[in-house]
Structures are given as C-alpha cells and as structure tokens.
Image: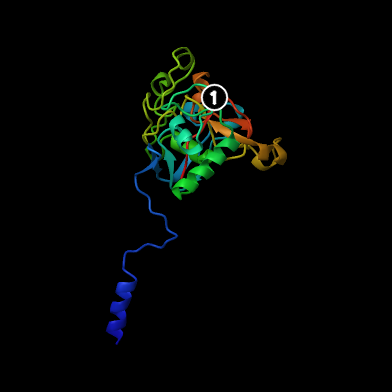
Amino acid sequence: MKNLLFLLLLVLVPTGIKSENKRTYTSTRYFSIKGVTFKMIFVQGGVYTMGATQEQIPYAEKDEYPAHKAMVQNFYIGETEVSQALWTAVMGKNPSKFKGDNWPVEYVSYNDCIKFIKALNSLTGENFRLPTEIEWEYAARGGKKSKGYIYSGGNNPTQVAWLWPDGIEDMHNQLKTKRPNELGLYDMSGSVWEWCDSPYNEYINANHNHITQFARKRFRVIRGGAYNGSNVYSRVSNRNLFVVWRHDDTLGFRLAL
C-alpha cells in the first residue's frame, strides 16, 4: 500500500517541477503584436556601483553623487526603445513628431507610457512595465558583463549614440543603427530620453531632500540623453526628470518585464 501511494505521488507531483511562484528566466524572449515583433533581453541581477563612478567623474553632476551600491534582481529589458510600429500596433495611432516605423516612439508622456503598457499587457497577458532607475542604469552599464564604459556600449559616443549634431542634421535616429552594449541593448545612450518608473530622489539624504512628496508624485526620472543633446547627457550615470504629463519629441521609453 505504501509503495502504491508513493507511485501515485510521483505521477501526480512530478519531480523537477518548480513552484508556480518561482519565475523561470531565459536569455531572450520574443513577442509579436499584429505582426510587429520585439525582443526582451534577460539581465542577470547583481550588485553594482551606481552614480558617479571613476569614469564618470570628469562630467558627473551633483545629483550623481555619492556613488553607492545598488542591488538588482533578475529582469528583462527591451533590446530597443519601443518603436513607432509597436506603439501603433497596440494603440492604433502614432504620436511621434518624426515619423518612421523603425524609429523610437516619442512625444509620449509618462502617463501615455502607462496607458500603452496596460494595453500591451491586456493583449499579451504579461506584466510589462517601465524599468526602475536602478535597473535602467545597471542595464545601460552592461550588468554583470560591464566593462566600465562612460556611455552604454563604449567610450566613443559617436559609435553608440545618436547625438547632436548628427541626430538633428541627418535625421538619423533609427533603432539598432549604432553599436549595442555588453548585453546586446541598443540606444541606451542618445536617441531619446527614456522614462523610468522611479520618482526623482537625490542620492544624498534621499528621504529628506528639497524635493517634496508632492513633487515626487508628479515627476519621474528620465535617462540616456537624446538626439539633440551633447554626449555629457548620454552618460550611463546622468540623471534628469520631467513632470509625468510632459510631452516632447525627445521623450520615449523601453519596456521591462
């Protein structure tokens, strides 16, 4: 009888099955919405130094200090910024000022991004979101594969980022036309600023700084610089913020999962 019960347990509860609450990660995940395919890259979590690290110091601003340890869990992040083709497939229309299917969607506020993500999750059954600021910088630096570059993917900004003047004069801003970083992520420097799902806080005395709770609810961090800016703003540790309803042709985003 005991042997029979044991065999029944083996059939009903196979060995090697993981708990439903434990997430399984693979190196890459592909998704397709109405014929538009996009890729999510796996980022192995870890601890890294965030902020004004040694290679950033010549250009680092006050809010990048002090450099400090930050912990990141495993997650996925978009290989590219959300394209205009994907936005249109999900939302039905393209808000961008500079049109092109293979260009990053822009002129989207933080609030617009949240609406897009809700619609995308409804279509896919997934839990897409915006990356946190800590996740964004970790991914831009190359995660565990980081080589300590100033920009995402290298120390020469022209190789990895669309910036002034080329980003304006030649109207070159297509996705995946510059060199990727160590994780295979494109355009995390330059192209368009990317919304993060993090309120802005100073690293020094973050809970008691001059940014009020009222302002924190209405501002979110943006990262990466944009096509009309200098290389200084496209460094991996550079920080900026915008009010959540702000629209601009330099504002876009990439997905996390």
From the top left corner, tell me how far across and down residue 199 is, in percent. 62, 39
Depth check: give the residue in front, 158 or 119: 119
Residue 181, quarter of picture? top left
Front-most of residues 57 and 88: 88
On the image, which quarter does residue 62 sit in? Answer: top right
Query: Residue at 48% of width from left, 43% of height from top?
Result: 120
Q: Is residue 251 above or below residue 49?
A: above
The residue under label 1 is which amino acid type? Thr
Q: Which residue corresponds to the image point at 40% horizontal and 30% vertical from the top-left? A: 186
Q: How is the image coloured?
A: rainbow
Task: Depth check: give the residue in front, 218 or 73.
Answer: 218
The relative height of residue 137 versus residue 126 in the rendered view (above or below) is above
Name the residue furthest bottom: 1
Compared to 37, does 228 lie above or below? Answer: above
From the image, which quarter does the N terminus lie in?
bottom left
Q: Position of residue 20 (x, y in %)?
A: 42, 61
Q: Label 1's element? A: loop
Asked whether residue 58 is in view, the answer is no
| x 43%, y 18%: residue | 172
Disc 1 residue crowd, few under 14, some 14–19, many 20+, Cα 10 Å: many
Q: Where does residue 75 sit, x and y in percent of width and height?
A: 44, 46
Q: Can residue 242 be seen?
A: yes
- Give the answer, above or below, for where 114 lies relative to 176: below
Identify the residue at horizontal 41%, vertical 18% (top origin): 158
Give the left or right position of residue 199, taking residue 172 as reference. Answer: right
Residue that badge 1 annotates? 250
* Lateral position of residue 100 relative to residue 28, left or right: right
